[in-house]
Image (tube, helix red, strand yellow):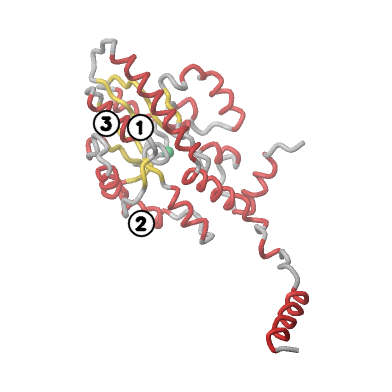
């Protein structure tokens, strides 16, 4: 037998012995990985689905239509828009992926490192819409649950993309509570707030704060006419009070979160 034939025969025998690669438990998500993998899947949707971009454009196109209608009317106070930042005008999905790929929990110190990098991308349509609003003398206020430590990086990130009113006077960060109502009232005291933009119901009204799963659904039903009218909602499949409500706003371990999610999903 020629040497090349012997080599080929040995290769065939070797492949036959090994067979196709078997899927082991190590290849499958561990029991406590359901939520982490879900967040990765949500992140890749935000980063790669053209449909996500289309949804964001849809939200900002509606915002512009609403603004044009409002601008026809008169107002006694200067007009303003209140917008959230994270997952409304800035996209932090890269930070989420960084954490999930390394199986790390959310950590405020690491979060501050991320915000200090001023590396978040923009949410599609955000710069264009807010620039348009500013061109119509509508002030933009950023009410965010980033805190004082995040201020410099946040302003740098917003300024990098030429967001309007990206200054200390218009950036209202979290002081002692993540609830935004008092900060909204502060802006409303001397402005006619015409639109609110956000990815989380708490960005719009106190009506939605710290509500249970059932109460959130009821409150949304009651406010149905406000969406696409005064409230403009951006999609966030990764996190938010929708998720916290499933956990009853408790601090849970990854395994406890996975169990909770399994209880909430609808099967048949
Ligand atoms: Mg947000």
Q: Residues within 10 Å of mark 3 (few under 14, many from 20)?
A: some
**Residue drawn at 42 percent across, 26 percent down:** 232
Identify residue for label 2.
113
Task: Give the residue furthest to the front.
Answer: 2
Up/down of 120 relative to 212, above or below: below
Q: Which mark is residue 237?
A: none
Identify residue for label 3.
131
Q: CA distance from mark 3 to mark 2?
A: 28 Å
**Residue drawn at 67 percent across, 65 percent down:** 26
Label 1 element class: strand
Left or right: 45 as drawn, with respect to 172: right
Q: Are marks 3 and 1 in contact (CB under 8 Å)?
A: no
Ligand 1, what quadrant? Answer: top left
In this rendered view, identify the residue nearer to me: 146 or 157.
157
* Among the 4 quarters of the image, the one containing residue 262: top right
**Residue drawn at 46 percent across, 57 percent down:** 98
Q: CA distance from mark 3 to mark 1?
A: 13 Å
**Residue drawn at 22 percent across, 26 percent down:** 135
Up/down of 268 relative to 221, above or below: below
The yes-or-no answer for disc 2 within 8 Å of ligand 1 is no
* Among the 4 quarters of the image, the one containing residue 267: top right
Up/down of 18 relative to 28, above or below: below
Label 3 element class: helix
Q: Which mark is residue 83?
A: 1
Q: Percent position (x, y) of residue 36?
A: 57, 52
């Amino acid at each position: 037998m020629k040497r090349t034939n012997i080599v080929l025969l040995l290769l065939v025998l070797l492949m036959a012995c090994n067979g196709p690669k078997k899927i082991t438990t190590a290849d499958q998500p561990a029991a406590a990985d359901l939520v982490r993998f879900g967040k990765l899947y949500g992140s890749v949707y935000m980063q790669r689905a053209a449909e996500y971009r289309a949804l964001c454009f849809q939200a900002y196109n509606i915002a512009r239509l609403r603004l044009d209608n409002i601008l026809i009317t008169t107002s006694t106070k200067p007009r303003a828009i209140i917008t959230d930042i994270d997952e409304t005008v800035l996209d932090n999905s890269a930070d989420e992926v960084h954490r999930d790929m390394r199986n790390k929990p959310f950590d405020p110190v690491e979060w501050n490192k991320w915000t200090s990098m001023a590396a978040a991308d923009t949410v599609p349509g955000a710069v264009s819409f807010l620039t348009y609003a500013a061109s119509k003398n509508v002030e933009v206020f950023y009410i965010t649950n980033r805190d004082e430590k995040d201020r410099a990086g946040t302003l740098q990130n917003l300024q990098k993309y030429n967001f309007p009113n990206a200054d200390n006077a218009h950036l209202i960060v979290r002081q002692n509570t993540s609830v935004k109502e008092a900060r909204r009232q502060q802006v409303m005291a001397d402005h006619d707030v015409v639109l609110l933009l956000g990815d989380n119901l708490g960005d719009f009204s106190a009506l939605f704060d710290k509500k249970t799963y059932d109460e959130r659904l009821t409150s949304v039903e009651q406010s149905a006419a406000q969406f696409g009218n005064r409230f403009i909602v951006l999609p966030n499949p990764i996190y938010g009070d929708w998720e916290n409500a499933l956990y009853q706003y408790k601090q849970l371990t990854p395994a406890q979160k996975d169990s909770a999610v399994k209880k909430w999903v609808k099967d048949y």
